[in-house]
Image (cartoon, rainbow, N blue to C red):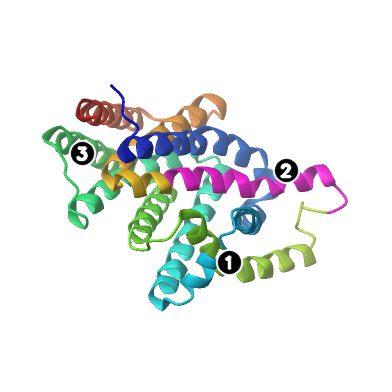
Amino acid sequence: MFIMNSFNKGIILTSLGSFWWGFLGVIYFKFIAYAGPIEVVVHRSIWTTVTLLITTLIFSKWFKIKEIFNFKKKLFILFVSGLLIFTNWSTWIYAVWNNQVIDASFGYFIMPIISIFFGYFFYKEKLSKKGFFSVFIVLVSILYLLLTNFENIPWVGLIVAISWSVYNLLKKKVLIDTDIGLLVESLYLVPFVLIIFYFISQNNYNDFTISDPGLMVIFMMAGPMTVIPLFLYVKGVELCGLGPTGMIFYITPTLQFLLGYYMYNEPLNLDKLVSFIFIWIAVFIYLKDLYEKN
């Protein structure tokens, strides 16, 4: 019998967020990639902030923002996590724009391994023998890829993996609502991205203009397209831990990989394919273990 406890809720939320990132997110940001990675990440930051301000107003959560300002440690952690999420967004958008979706998916394959390590080492989350075995297979597959393609290491993937994994670690240390935390992080970014947008517009490099309402709406959708999956995933982490959600997140790179190869015709050599096959086997073993436990 399936019981909707906190753990199962976390698995469902993370799965939905992962699907959104891996499929809907890729298609959307690929569609607006013609504007260039700099302008896209600027709009993503601005409209994410606007979206969160609206949701905070609707759900009357302003008092929670005031509470945060009473804790300097939380403010500092959110400042650092804000820099990490901006780094993650910028790198991923660059990868989509530069036809490196498969390389980005490589980073997302690595990311859960780091998350599992953090969950086990820092938070003492349990990991079964099957879990350890699946992690070992993933590690071997990644080492194989690095050794056989050292000259073509997917740096964008590595940056995406490290920034997002550390981001998740920090979020576990800040006991506030996911949307409020992201709003504070986004507010830290707003002055910086507004300055960037000013220089872009002054040099006529911007595609966003009030004379084209349809295009404005498309760019403004970057807010909801970011907030919804991030909220789902981070909330899932809070409910069931870094380890399980780290493995569930493999939905994202798998879909990215398929889109990059089949829809966007990105190149894929045999070594990468072999590595990815081993990773998928490891994911299957771990998810089967989770299912048997729940």
Structural distance between the alpha carbons of marks 3 and 1? 37 Å
Q: Which residue is mark 3?
A: 135
Q: Is residue 147 left or right of residue 81?
A: left
Question: Secondary structure of the magenta portion, mostly?
Answer: helix
Q: Residue at x 42, y 76 (%)?
A: 71
- Three-letter amino acid code of the residue under disc 3: Val
Q: Secondary structure at mark 2?
A: helix
Q: Is residue 185 left or right of residue 268?
A: right
Which segment is the magenta one?
Answer: 210-233
Could you tell me residue 175's position as x and y percent?
37, 61
Q: Which residue is mark 2?
A: 218
Q: Secondary structure at mark 1?
A: helix
Q: Which residue is mark 1?
A: 187
In the rendered image, the residue lying farthest to the top is: 1
Could you tell me residue 158's position as x and y percent?
37, 50
Q: Quadrant of the C terminus?
A: top left
Asked if residue 86 can be seen in this view, the reply is no
